[in-house]
Image (cartoon, rainbow, N blue to C red):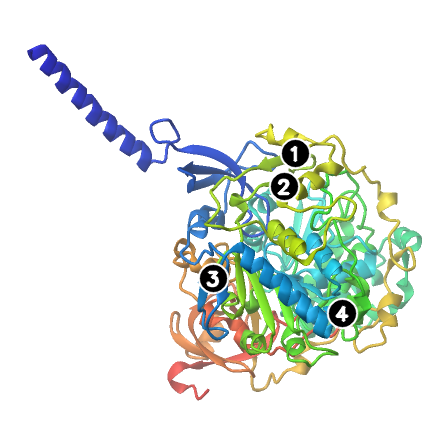
Amino acid sequence: MSETADNIRIGKNEREISMLDTKALLDSKIPCDETGIIVKTGICGFCGDACPVDVYCKDGKVIKVEGNTSLPGGSGRVCVKGAALKQALYHPDRLKYPMKRTGERGEGKFERISWEEALTTIAQKLSETKDKYGAKQTLFYAGHPKWFRPQLTELANEYGTPNVGTESSTCAYSLMMACQSVFGKGVMMPMPDMRRCKMLVVWGVNALYSNPVNGGGALLNALQRGIKLIVIDPRCTPTTEHADIHLRPIPGTDGALALGMARVIITEGLQNQEYIDKYTIGYEKYRDYVMEFTPEKVEEITGVPKEDMMEAARCMAANAPFPIQLSASPVVHNINGMQNARAIAMLLALTGSFGMPGGSVPPGPGRAVLKDAFMGTRKKRVNADQDISHEEFPAWAKLTEHEAQVTKIADYIEGKGDYPLRTVLSFGMNHHMWPRPDRLEEAFKHLDFFVNADLYMTDTCKYADIILPVQASLEREQVQIMGFDTIFYQGHVAEPAGESRTDMDIITGIADKLGVTIGGDEPIHSNEEYLRKSLTTTGLTLEEVKKAPDGVKVKHRMPSRTSEEILKVKTPSGKIEFFSELMESCEKEEHEGLPVYHDFRENLPMDEYPLILTTGSRKPQLFHSRTYRLPWLANLEKYPVVEIHPEDAKELCMKDEEMVVLVTPVGSMELCLSVNSSCLRGTVNVYHGAGEKDINLLLDDTYLDPVSGFPGYKSYCCRLEKKEESHE
């Protein structure tokens, strides 16, 4: 009897110990049978990049995210945004079901409906607009994410509208236009040869904050090889700390700086004349123009000491071929941004650095490609010459043929274009990306019908007639190219939220309701069919990649390219163009064939607003407005803040963490002051997207680059006033 009792007692103790151990294992998130925690490999995708991550899941829910090492490009690191994926996936604002508006636009009152009702209503409204007004009065729009853009364009083509727009109306495409005007179609951004360069010029990029973890790692690896580093950035950043030369131009004056560097190189005979004679055209006109930019004039315009500018120019020439690393937007968020970017790109041609080993767009092995994937594919549009922006932005129309420029969307909706936009079908639209988002909110009220698909109930969704829930990256099936030639299949790492669907399933669902088919000769009716089609260029099947948890090598990839092949550029002349006949043919203000510098300050009331306002400089924890909703990230720093140099703060009798009033020609806003020595004197920096404190509310929506249509986010004007003294 006692033995039995002892056995029972011992067994109970063992169970108690086991329960304690299991709790400890659960608290530590240890994957094992006792906890039921499993680890799956997935693609973060939160900021649009494809960083591989190890995802700890229990009962279909994500409980932790770490960096992955099993896939090509997996560094074992995860950025601070990726570490917060759990909060992003399970935030209370996640959309879970299709909904239709029941209140006034902007009130945010909706009721749940079925997918059948949602898709049927969307198709009916699209058809009504087409029948009554014509298809072109409907805009198809893609914001974030971007991967399905080619298929959205196909749907727009089947519907009959040329009006396909994206967030790239204020991101990347101005830089791409600049590069294509110099180096020809197909050269979107001049990618640097990080592995072979002797020197790197980082222009307006803080790679250690703004790039995915692998991008920052590539820079650090190059530095470990002993390369020279020139950084051109008004601010002091973690990247500038590694610089051999750090030039700090006044924001928006980059073009004058590049032209001054070119003058130094030419006058000292440091240009690569053999390369210029063989591969370029228009050099003589360019040479004559840059002679205007003497070191003294450049110092006056840019604020960069002439000796530093000249040293940097000589260093570039001495270490050519070299690459220039540019980011999508900093240089071109300026009302002369496209021309400034052209002037920068021409330094590569001047020194023989484009298309060469160690330079930009270097020769190298071919990569795997997915069929009809974003970035690799540009779908032509029907009736592109009838799109809403065609006449207003002729260079955009010539160099960005696959979409309309929609920065002036508020005007177009209000009927201030050649015709009004009456219906908008959008995916991931964030109207805070435009200057004066309040104007766009008023414009939304003029729409006949508005759809937005998104992860969250955003401010934009509140103005929609129907909102559709989409799956996050970890929730949807997808295939990704990792490294050069490995295909990785991701299943449903996390259970999709509610009834959310993939963007592709939504697009094909609308197509089915409209009675049309996308995909051409290989039609697609679902996300799975899209995945199967995308793999046809690799020689692999979906079943094959599903069986390879760590990815599988492709059977086919693009052929490698030599320098001579790269230098057979697709410009009108067939050569790299220092002078663009395409630009000149636009016959419109500031569309010069040369990269002419126009100073933004001539267009602003600088006497009344003497500080230069720059917005959007990267912070590692933020990704536009999307991350403000995540407590782990938002709590890392008081927000929003206005950053200012200590000497400027002293002159204004302002102190750190004091509430001040920032005033622009548009309006005013109370912000917390952050005295920050990383700022350039005479400038203030404000991050964007902070809801009611969104700095874009204070930016004039007519302050645009006449060539690209891009807003001048990096070089507007303002003043700061003490809160108690402000009369704004």
- In this picture, residue 607 sits left or right of residue 375: left
Q: Which residue is mark 1?
A: 542
- Counting residues from the start of the chain, the first of labels 1 and 4 encountered is 4
**Label 3: which secondary element:** loop
Q: Residue 281 appears in which quarter of the rendering?
A: bottom right
The amino acid type, in three-letter code, at marker 4 is Asp
Q: Disc 3 to disc 4, how far (Cα)?
A: 30 Å
**Dot 4, crowdedness within 10 Å: few (<14), some or many (≥20)?**
many
- Counting residues from the start of the chain, the first of labels 3 and 1 encountered is 3
Q: Could you say which is closer to the camera, residue 3 or residue 184?
A: 3
Q: Disc 3 to disc 1, how far (Cα)?
A: 34 Å
**Label 1: which secondary element:** helix
The amino acid type, in three-letter code, at marker 1 is Leu
Q: Which residue is mark 2?
A: 528
Q: Which residue is mark 4?
A: 387
Q: Which mark is residue 457?
A: 3
489 vs 126: above or below: above
507 vs 482: above or below: below
Q: Could you say which is closer to the camera, residue 292 or residue 344?
A: 344
Q: Disc 2 to disc 3, how far (Cα)?
A: 27 Å
